[in-house]
Image: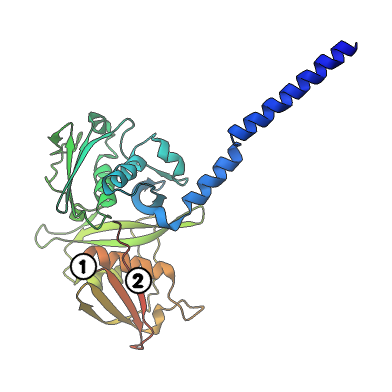
Amino acid sequence: MIKQMAYRKLAITTLALLIVGILYFFPNNKEIKYKEIVKYYDEDNLKSVYLMDKYNYVSKLKVPIYENDLLEMIKEKINYLIIGDDSNNKIPNGFRGLLPSGTRVLDLKLDNDILTINFSKEILNVNSNDEEHMIEAIVFTLTEFDKINKVKINVEGNPLTELPLSKKKLPELLDRSFGINKIYDFESLNNLTQTIVYYVNKIDNETYYTPVTKINNDERDKVTLVIEELKSNIIYQTNLSTYLNQAASLDKYEIEGDKIILLFNDKIFDTNSKNILEEVEYTISMSLMDNLGVKEVIFRVNNEKNDISVIKTLEN
């Protein structure tokens, strides 16, 4: 009996030491998860990628990027766009990548402001509903970098000259003029213009922004067109919002180098305060930055020196 008790005590002691050893050498999952969350919300490593939201719009949102070298950052960004990649667990609910599972970046070359990106053949397995949006996501994601203005896409070393399924021709060099979430509304093929307008969207109370390229015969200047589009109550795209008051009036604007100064009446303020809503600042600023190439948008109300400045975040 005493011998059995001794064996039991020895077994319990051994088991306890084993558990302590496991906890010491292999931290529990809760601690690991906590560290990942802290790193995820570190503003210094959040960068922009374009993913498909649940409403089928290619939309801009921030994800953590941990690499410091530019080419490695590009690869890390692209991983978020690949369906089934391990980085997908850091994507918020309601979003997904557009590159087919198994796609790999074979090599990269940056020459001046042109990035040549060579993909594996799996990228050709894209479905017909995603193929044009896939190109939009690649181009807009990569041209967020200050040093990249144009993208050349190769597959296994050969230029991608057309969409894999529809066979729609692609330009050799792609930039933001390719458009995103395109809406066509024109009566004539003459004097076509295209304007990118950013709208507000929400999933699970998280705000993000969706660009829409409008292709039409509207001959108004880009600044006027953007403001009027954002003031309109008629939004042809469902699930998109604009918070700009219809009574807001752009009285004047001035472009000085790489910045634009907008002079509004006080109807641009939130009705409950003397502040401009963040959603209003961002939809206007991102739209003008994409269309005009400016890097700073300054809001001035009633020509008073109460400027609010939105500066483009340059990803290096």
What percent of the width, then of the height, locates residue 222?
A: 21, 69
- At a point 62% along the width and 34% down the height, the residue shown is 24
Of residues 195 and 159, the one nearer the viewer is 159
- The residue under label 2 is 310
Specify whether residue 181 is in view.
no
Q: Is residue 222 left or right of residue 169?
A: right
Where the N terminus falls, by quadrant? top right
For this orientation, the residue located farthest to the right is 1
Query: Can you give x and y, in whole percent of width and height, for residue 252 in the image?
Result: 26, 83
Q: Residues within 10 Å of mark 2 (few under 14, many from 20)?
A: some
Whole-Å distance between the Cαs marked 2 and 1? Answer: 15 Å
Q: Disc 2 marks which amino acid?
A: Val
Of labels 2 and 1, earlier in sequence is 1
Q: Amino acid at mark 1?
A: Leu
Residue in the image at 42% along x and 36% along y: 86
| Residue 49, x across and y down, in percent | 34, 50
Residue 229 visible in rendering: yes
Q: For mark 1, what is the residue?
A: 292
For the C terminus, the quadrant is bottom left
